[in-house]
Amino acid sequence: MFNHRTMKFAAIFLSPICRFFWILGILCLFGGGCATSYVDRVQLSRKKFYAGNLDSSRKEMEHQLKWGRRKEADLVKLETAVMDMSNGKMREAKTALREVRDRFDDNERKKLVGNTLSLWTDDTVVSYSGEDYEKVMIRMMLTVADLLDNGGDAEAYSLQVIEKQEQIRQNANKKPLRDKDDNELPNPKLAYKQVAFGEYLRGVLREETLTNYDDAERAYQHVVSWEPKFSQGKTDLLRVQQGQHHQQGNGVVYVVAFVGRGPYKAQVNAEATQIALLIADRVFSMMNKYSVPPTLAPVPIPEIRRYYDNIHAVGIYADGKPVSATETITDVGQMAIDQFNANRDMIIAKTIIRRVVKKGTVYAAKEVADVNPWVSLLMDVGGVVWEAYEAADTRCWGLLPDRIQVARLELPAGEHTLELQSISEQGKPLSSQKYPVTIHVANGYNSYILANFPQNELVGKISINERE
């Protein structure tokens, strides 16, 4: 039987104070704020990818997929999809992209992002469900992969790009937040800029039929409206209005280029803005009868940033002569930053709620245990450690390009050698290396080329889809 000393120890062990510190320890040990982040775990693979070592880079990612964290598996699959596309393996890329697309959509329906556990730790404890720009980009990458694979679904995927953007806007309208006076708070997602790439490829595919110029014209009109700086769009629109896809005896080559390194996230400490406090108060009041304190210390949030590499575009040579350069149809990095800035107050608000929940938990534990001042101080210290252990969720699809660019070339039917080379904003070569590819141009038809230039040199191989 237990003796008196054992019973006394058990009473202390099972006291509210000890339970508080045991729970705190478990949350810190198995929750968020870990010593190594997702970025740390995939850093070596990304470095190898940008250095052009695709096979070694993919093996590193496969190791992460097999032995890494399940809640990061979808992100790893997105990274490998870009690797596969860069290596000409479009079918493998499509399989991974479709799988993650469907799981992200399922997570949206189940609202797994709002997992309660994240309020006690941080967002890194739940499965990553993608930023809005990443969900759109999955469909854009599917469109490109299918276009190069000649799978027949490229137009359907291009429509998904448009539909997903509209779905995001519609979902933003379903449950608007209201202030204490029942005034509806503006939803930042309604101001998202439309992405033109899906409509552009739809116009390209409709135009090639030589009978659907009206559809192509509507698509190009959207492109011109959404991307006024994309000069090729105006040329495309004028051409379809004249009903002329190509000159007699010619075919068309579209060069699609992934240019620059995509956006990334970095942890920063953000001040609690008035709007963020208002949003946090409204959300928190739905969870219980309490309000959010008017002032709080800065909270850690994941800020989206972009690289600024020297590469501006890809210069194109046809049969040894310079003929064109790619032009940005979708600025992925700017899209990501714009969406982050639009949602910044909402992101801060979510972190404020987490901070309030943690402070409230410490306060409630003190009340239940009726602790003395010394124990109260110790619990305050534990609460500070708990908050300090929190980390911003810097997970993201890191191997995305910074920009998706295109160029349209009309060439005489027959075999041609094209060469691709990175160029600066002034049009000067950034590398002595020109990357050649031989392509057969079919009379009256489109052919497609894909190349990935995250920096000055090509990564992987140039992929083609040509008509015989």
Image (tube, rainbow, N blue to C red):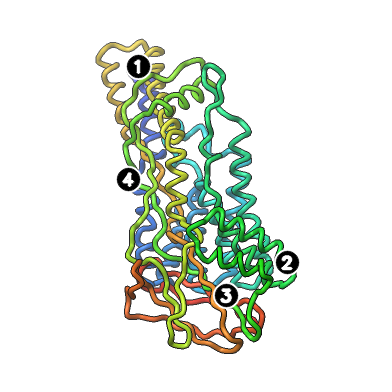
Judge depth for marks 4 and 2 and give the one in front. Answer: 2
From the top left corner, tell me how far across and down residue 282 is, in percent.
50, 23
Q: Which residue is mark 1?
A: 8
Q: Please tell me which residue lies in front, 395 or 215.
A: 215
Judge depth for marks 3 and 1 and give the one in front. Answer: 3
Q: Which residue is mark 3?
A: 448
Task: Answer yes or no: is residue 423 visible.
Answer: yes
Q: Please tell me which residue lies in front, 398 or 370.
A: 398
Q: Earlier in the sequence, mark 2 or mark 1?
A: 1
Dot 2 amino acid type = Asn
- Work out which quarter of the rendered image holds the N terminus and state it: top left
Instruction: Find the distance from the CA under tag 4 to the CA under tag 2.
Output: 56 Å
Q: Please tell me which residue lies in front, 27 or 208.
A: 208
Q: Which residue is mark 2?
A: 212
Q: Are marks 2 and 1 in contact (CB under 8 Å)?
A: no
From the top left corner, tell me how far across and down residue 53 is, in percent.
38, 72
**Helix or strand or loop: what does disc 2 sit on?**
loop
